[in-house]
Image (tube, grey):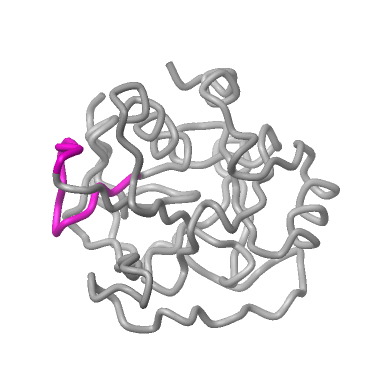
Amino acid sequence: MSERPLTDPALDPRLGGRRAFLTTIATVGAGALAGCLGDDDGVPEPIAIADDHYCPMCNMVVVNHPGPAGHAFYPEEAEARAEQDGVVPYCASTCAYEHYFEKEEHGHEPIVLYLTDYSKVDWEVYEQGGQLFITAHFAAEDHTAATDLEFVVDSDVLGAMGESAIGFSDAADADAFAEEYGGGRYDHDSITRELIESLGFV
């Protein structure tokens, strides 16, 4: 897949903005320091997505695109492809889960998978080309472990790869989003490869 023209995230209103439709106050992530220092359990902290991070599943530069993004830390023996700055970045939650299932088939799980937490950020839904998209957020504190998120799947709102799984750490936020834009609510353990592929990711 060819990469789209570079968009400066600082100038693109798609990549940030005020929350348009929900009023839940954004919470600040406890992991304020980006990097790989980790917590007491040895789980690395989330990092900020850099301008040159690209997604190994589709070769797209992550910051050029809307919607949920993320990154995963894998143990060395997993030999995760396209590690960058010690992580595997993803342009979309669907890419993240497809890679997750690919590695799982070979007996490897990530130390942690982080995805955009829309309960933490001032998100916006905007229309482009007759379709709805949700803004992307790339700061370290904008990410939460996927195991702690509730996802709205198959809504009317798209991400980088089309139909998406949009994560919220507050289940009430997820329910409100689904009421506004459609879709069903799933936790991490309910996300299957079949579900991801049903969104058009093959």
**Number of marks in the image?**
0
Taking the magenta stretch, the answer to whether it contains residue 196 is no
Q: Residue 45 location, x and y as percent?
A: 34, 70
Front residue of 53/99: it is 99
> Quarter-wise, where is residue 86 in the image?
bottom left
Q: In the rendered image, which quarter contains the C terminus?
A: top left
Residue 92: image location, x then y, percent: 43, 42
Q: Which residues are magenta?
A: 77-90
Nearer-the-camera pick, 8 or 142: 142
Residue at the extreme right: 179
Left or right: 11 as drawn, with respect to 60: right
Q: Residue furthest front?
A: 41
Q: Residue at x 38, y 35 (%)?
A: 100
Q: Is 89 colored magenta in this rendering?
A: yes
**Residue at image x 65%, y 46%?**
151
Toward the viewer: 160 or 77?
77
Q: Give the left or right position of residue 69, taking residue 199 as reference.
A: left
Q: Quadrant of the N terminus?
A: top left
Q: Which residue appears at 28% of the width and 31% of the height? A: 57
x 76%, y 37%: residue: 184
188 left or right, relative to 137: right
Examine the residues drawn in magenta and state their main secondary structure.
loop
Q: Position of residue 19 (x, y in %)?
A: 66, 69
The part of the image, by quadrant, that contains residue 124 is bottom right
Q: Is residue 162 above or below residue 64?
A: above
